[in-house]
């Protein structure tokens, strides 16, 4: 990878096959998969390289499904984060004080873990390290696009500092607010959950044994996720009205509130990261393609973290788009052609809608204390727990093994 510093005056255009906007986990994965297959890629990222290479903790412990791990491995990313990834061996789902529960045990579907927990900053660091090792990638950072020009043969970005980038295909991987999506005139549908996700890491006395806990409380789901070095990640959903006061508590008060939700099974607990709070909403781009443009990751969709699927779905986008591009490029054809974009759009639309609907439905079903609903969902959990075939199906879903999977998610070569 070469890093292009800003220039003081306009310079000659950089011409590549694909321009990716955003060097987050999804944009970096697209770039790494494409460059690994010999394509030339420019990555346009707004943040300073120093921040990209050494990101601070954002408190997020990300659950990576088995199929997503395979895609990261195919791009040479997984080996850079594997030591910091804790396998999820079991998942236990409980509802308030109900004695009924659901228990997923990885041995019921094979010998691979159900997934892994990795801190977001580790994923980001691994992404940048991988891009740096790929000769086909030029990272332009810090850089922002002032103007896009889309034409029949390609697209041109005029950067704020005068640099120009020309590409056959533009990939918008610039997050939920996606200026690239907005500049292309693509609207979003969005609603606010009026909930916030409070996240932090804790260190504890007793081992977690690789068990992830999802506990449904009236304010929303509360998750305890196993991390390396006897730590766990907390994802604590609260109403947005209550969250700021919880985050602002003293460490002692915060830990006492936490203990009232976790119980005592982890022994003595202390905070091992700062606390962060994220307002939660659902959003979906009205289209995920336009001529010469594809949307991936949070630029295309944003969902509730209830099932830990946001990045996993973004990884599916990256894998599907890379496959569509690489397949035509191997035939010597245009990597940004309408055929590529149509294949990508068709492939991802349904899967994304299903996941958005599932996370939204789960959150609505479980974030309340209406007695008949509670009874119905508790009986549902207990019923699934007693039906091995149904349970295996749900586990395979959580592992990202269901659906029309791109090759790298099936563990095959791109
Ligand atoms: C509390 C919480 C818990 C979560 N837990 C999970 C989980 O367990 N599992 C899971 O799969 N997902 C989880 N997610 C979702 C996951 O974090 C996101 O889906 C994922 O980070 C999206 O990655 P991305 O690369 O699409 O976007 P981002 O990570 O937002 O990256 C976007 C990049 O674009 C850059 N950028 C922005 N604007 C510009 C611009 N104008 N020009 C150039 N660059 C720009 C940014 O600097 C950034 O580098 C969670 C989310 C939250 C809030």
Image: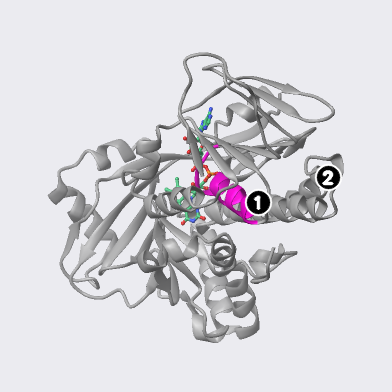
Front residue of 177/18: it is 18
What residue is drawn where x is 59% and y is 78%?
Answer: 391
Does the closest atom of ligand 1 sit within 8 Å of the Cβ of label 2? no
Q: Is residue 322 above or below residue 380?
A: above
Residue 98 appears in view: no
What span is colored magenta in the figure? 22-36
Any mark on residue 342, and which? Answer: 2
In the rendered image, residue 66, in percent from the top left (x then y), is placed at: 55, 69
Binning the other alpha carbons within 10 Å of mark 1 as few (below 14), some (14 to 19) or many (20 upward) gives many
In the rendered image, residue 127, in percent from the top left (x then y), is placed at: 47, 51
Q: Quadrant of residue 97?
A: bottom left
Looking at the image, how many numbered discs can be counted on the residues?
A: 2
In the rendered image, residue 305, in percent from the top left (x then y), is placed at: 49, 52
Binning the other alpha carbons within 10 Å of mark 2 as few (below 14), some (14 to 19) or many (20 upward) gives some
Q: Judge left or right: residue 201 versus residue 93.
A: left
Mark toward the viewer: 2 or 1: 1
Q: Residue furthest top?
A: 9
What residue is drawn where x is 75% and y is 38%?
Answer: 289
Q: Which residue is mark 1?
A: 34
Q: Is residue 29 magenta?
A: yes
Dominant SS type (magenta): helix
What residue is drawn where x is 25% and y is 56%?
Answer: 258
Q: Is residue 154 above or below residue 125?
A: above
Of pointers 2 and 1, the one earlier in the residue sequence = 1
| SS at circle 1 | helix
Front residue of 157/238: it is 157
In the rendered image, residue 156, in percent from the top left (x then y), is placed at: 70, 25
Q: Is residue 88 magenta?
A: no
Q: CA distance from mark 2 to mark 1?
A: 18 Å
């Amino acid at each position: 990878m070469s890093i292009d510093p800003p220039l003081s005056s306009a310079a000659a255009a950089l011409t590549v096959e694909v321009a990716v906007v955003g060097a987050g986990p999804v944009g970096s994965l697209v770039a790494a998969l494409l460059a690994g297959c010999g394509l030339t890629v420019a990555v346009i990222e707004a943040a300073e390289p120093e921040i990209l290479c050494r990101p601070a903790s954002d408190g997020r412990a990300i659950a990576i499904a088995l199929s997503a791990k395979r895609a990261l491995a195919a791009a040479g990313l997984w080996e850079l984060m594997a030591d910091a990834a804790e396998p999820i061996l079991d998942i236990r789902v409980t509802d308030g004080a109900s004695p009924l529960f659901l228990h997923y045990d990885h041995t019921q579907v094979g010998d691979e873990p159900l997934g892994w927990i990795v801190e977001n900053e580790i994923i980001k660091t691994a992404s940048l390290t991988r891009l740096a090792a790929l000769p086909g990638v030029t990272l332009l950072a810090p850089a922002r696009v002032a103007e896009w020009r889309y034409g029949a043969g390609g697209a041109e970005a005029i950067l704020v500092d005068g640099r120009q980038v020309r590409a056959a295909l533009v990939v918008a991987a610039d997050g939920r607010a996606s200026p690239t999506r907005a500049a292309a005139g693509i609207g979003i549908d969005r609603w606010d959950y009026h909930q916030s996700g409070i996240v932090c890491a804790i260190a504890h006395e007793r081992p977690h044994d690789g068990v992830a806990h999802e506990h449904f409380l009236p304010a929303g789901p509360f998750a305890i996720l196993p991390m390396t070095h006897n730590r766990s990640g907390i994802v604590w959903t609260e109403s947005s009205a209550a969250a700021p006061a919880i985050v602002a508590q003293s460490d002692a008060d915060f830990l006492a509130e936490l203990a009232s939700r976790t119980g005592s099974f982890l022994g003595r607990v202390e905070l091992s990261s700062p606390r962060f709070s994220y307002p939660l909403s659902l959003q979906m781009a009205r289209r995920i393609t336009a001529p010469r443009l594809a949307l991936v990751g949070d630029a295309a969709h944003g969902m509730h973290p209830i099932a830990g699927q946001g990045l996993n779905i973004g990884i599916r986008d990256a894998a599907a788009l890379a496959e569509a591009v690489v397949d035509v490029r191997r035939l010597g054809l245009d990597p940004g052609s309408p055929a590529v974009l149509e294949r990508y759009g068709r492939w991802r639309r349904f899967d994304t809608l299903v996941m958005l609907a599932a996370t939204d439905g789960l959150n609505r079903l479980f974030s309340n204390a209406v007695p008949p609903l509670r009874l119905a969902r508790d009986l549902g959990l207990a019923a699934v727990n007693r039906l091995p075939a149904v349970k295996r199906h749900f586990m395979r879903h959580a592992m990202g093994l269901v659906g029309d999977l791109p090759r790298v998610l099936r563990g095959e070569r791109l």
